[in-house]
């Protein structure tokens, strides 16, 4: 029995050392202003901002309609949206590639191996999450609220805005979930972006590359950097939430 | 809500206004290449020198040779640097590329545990593969249609052996070369790799890796790298002139010398052999 415990302790120590080394290396990368790391950070922030903005702009109105109105085929549509939340990222990457390759229907726009190209794929990835979760948020609103707003003489646009306002916490939860998925995906960035140094290399594709190169420590460090960015984003969001 | 909108708007503004370093056009060359030229750091080393000499920025995406050829066929890149001669010749014959120019080589080696449980050390490649099969020693294969994978398949055929597929000792990783070596090391098994990637692996492990070179030097193990410009009549938008500039540069004496000088642990990874 003691040998078992000893083994467990040794094992945990080894794992801890691995992660600790990653922490130090992550700190070093950031503090020393490592150009490659900052280029990947910037690509990640940029592309995930593009895609989260697009998917919020498209997804919230659609999700609102799906949650707010009653129409035939609403339930099956919900099921479809929920199923699409499970879209595999590599599959989306392949689909987007087929459209934007030079020989594809959208080839003329030159989107392959660019950040906007990745953003298209990531928007497709985020949309079902935004639509599904905002529909749920709107659905779970109090029915009396709508009557109250209407009785105050609100027009349709005002009704839409105030309903969204009441559902804001649910919408925010959806946005955070989608942002997490978008920022951490590898499949689309690799397939559509091509992991091109200084251009489309994001943190996740850099992790995949460093792992392939056998530089595991650097991979862990970059993972920690990604988590740090997500932490900053969530801190800002919770700050905003307290204010509004 | 207003505050949130303002915050999002500011974020978008910052993101859009930042100057993009990707200046498109003539001064950029898009290459599809194999994992070995990227993972060893060769392109990281050559690209700045190429920019210095010509002012052209080299961008590359590293995949297996199979996908690299597909990207060329679909006109998504201007130039290829790959290492699967039969597939390359077919690519040119099909009209997707103009001309194939050999630029450098290294060789494939079979690596395995130092203790060599199957006993293949020093054998010919044919005997080594036959022994691996009869001893059912764990062998990791790339299994990804890359140049290395195609080569390995041809070696099984050359040894008059059926290509293993579902055998429990034959592990198809579907990953890059270094990842495949690592899997072989974890399973205490054998694998085939190009020498460049092996030296990189050795240097990652401070020169003391668990897997050692066991079979080498057979003439069939030559690993030839070539560059091919994508055919401008097939792909009207391909940067053909820029691609030609790269080909001229890489085959020229300066770049050939740079390739010769590219070393890890004091060992050269590639041997230049362009005939111009």
Image (cartoon, helix red, strand yellow):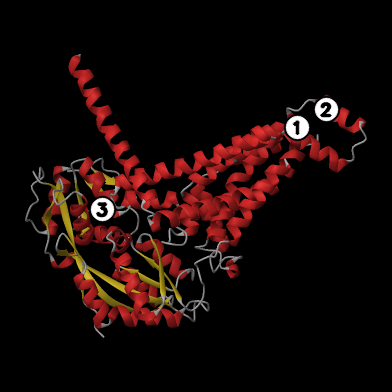
Q: Nearer the viewer, mark 3 or mark 2?
A: 2
- Name the chain under label 1: A
Q: Is residue B40 visible?
A: yes
Instruction: Examine the rendered structure and indicate whether residue B121 appears above or below residue A99.
Output: above
- Front residue of A178/A71: it is A178
* Mark number, residue A2: none
Tell me which corner region of the image, top left, top right, bottom left or bottom right, holds residue A147: top right
Residue at disc 1, secondary structure: helix
Q: Residue at x 60, y 38 (%)?
A: A237
Q: Where is residue B211 drawn, in percent x and y?
A: 15, 48
Q: Are marks 2 and 1 in contact (CB under 8 Å)?
A: yes
Q: Earlier in the sequence, mark 2 or mark 1?
A: 2
**What distance separates the C-alpha of mark 3 from that of mark 2?**
69 Å
Of the pair A233 and B247, the residue shown nearer to us: A233
Tell which of B21 and A76 is nearer to you: B21
Q: Which residue is mark 3?
A: B163
Vertical order, B9 against B84 (above or below): above
> x and y percent of residue A113 in the render?
49, 63
Q: Chain of mark 3?
A: B
Q: Which mark is residue A166?
A: 1
**Disc number lying in front (1 or 3):** 1
- Asked whether the beta carbons under mark 1 and mark 3 sit within 8 Å of each other, the answer is no
Task: Give a yes or no on whether discs 3 and 2 share a subunit.
Answer: no
In the drawing, what numbered circle is on residue A145? Answer: 2
Quarter holding the N terminus of chain B?
top right
């Amino acid at each position: 029995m003691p040998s078992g415990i000893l083994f467990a302790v040794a094992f945990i120590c080894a794992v801890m050392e691995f992660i600790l080394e990653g922490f130090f290396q992550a700190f070093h990368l950031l503090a020393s202003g490592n150009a490659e790391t900052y280029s990947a950070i910037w690509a990640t922030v940029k592309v995930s901002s593009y895609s989260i903005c697009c998917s919020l702009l498209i997804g919230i109105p659609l999700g609102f309609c799906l949650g707010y109105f009653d129409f035939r085929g609403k339930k099956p549509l919900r099921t479809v949206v929920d199923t699409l939340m499970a879209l595999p990222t590599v599959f989306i990457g392949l689909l987007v590639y087929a459209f934007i390759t030079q020989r594809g229907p959208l080839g003329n726009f030159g989107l392959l191996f660019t950040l906007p190209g990745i953003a298209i794929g990531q928007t497709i990835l985020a949309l079902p999450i935004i639509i599904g979760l905002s529909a749920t948020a709107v659905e779970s609103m109090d029915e009396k609220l709508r009557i109250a707003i209407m009785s105050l003489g609100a027009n349709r646009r005002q009704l839409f805005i105030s309903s969204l306002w009441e559902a804001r916490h649910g919408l925010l939860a959806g946005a955070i979930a989608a942002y997490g998925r978008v920022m951490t995906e590898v499949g689309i960035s690799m397939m559509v972006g091509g992991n091109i140094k200084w251009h489309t290399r994001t943190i996740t594709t850099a992790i995949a590359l460093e792992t392939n190169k056998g530089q595991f420590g650097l991979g862990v460090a970059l993972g920690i950097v990604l988590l740090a960015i997500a932490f900053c984003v969530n801190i800002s969001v919770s700050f905003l939430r307290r204010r509004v | 809500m207003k505050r949130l909108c303002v915050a999002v708007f500011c974020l978008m503004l910052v993101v859009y206004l930042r100057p993009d370093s990707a200046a498109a056009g003539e001064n950029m060359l898009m290459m599809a290449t194999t994992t070995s030229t990227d993972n060893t750091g060769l392109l990281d080393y050559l690209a700045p020198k190429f920019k210095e000499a010509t002012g052209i920025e080299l961008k590359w995406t590293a995949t297996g040779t199979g996908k690299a050829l597909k990207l060329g066929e679909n006109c998504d890149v201007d130039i290829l640097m790959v290492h699967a001669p039969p597939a390359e010749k077919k690519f040119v014959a099909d009209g997707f590329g103009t001309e194939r120019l050999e630029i450098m080589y290294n060789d494939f080696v079979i690596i395995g545990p130092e203790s060599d449980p199957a006993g293949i050390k020093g054998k010919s490649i044919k005997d080594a593969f036959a022994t691996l099969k009869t001893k059912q020693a764990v062998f990791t294969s790339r299994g990804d249609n890359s140049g290395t994978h195609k080569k390995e398949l041809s070696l099984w055929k050359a040894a008059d052996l059926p290509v293993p597929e579902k055998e429990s000792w034959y592990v198809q990783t579907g990953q890059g070369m270094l990842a495949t070596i690592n899997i072989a090391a974890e399973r205490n098994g054998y694998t085939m790799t190009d020498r460049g990637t092996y030296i990189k692996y050795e240097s990652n492990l401070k020169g003391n890796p668990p897997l050692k070179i066991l079979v080498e030097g057979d003439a069939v193990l030559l690993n030839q790298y070539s560059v091919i410009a994508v055919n401008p009549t097939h792909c009207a938008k391909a940067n053909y002139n820029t691609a030609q500039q790269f080909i001229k540069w890489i085959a020229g004496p300066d770049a050939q010398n740079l390739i010769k000088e590219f070393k890890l642990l004091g060992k050269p990874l590639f041997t230049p052999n362009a005939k111009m």
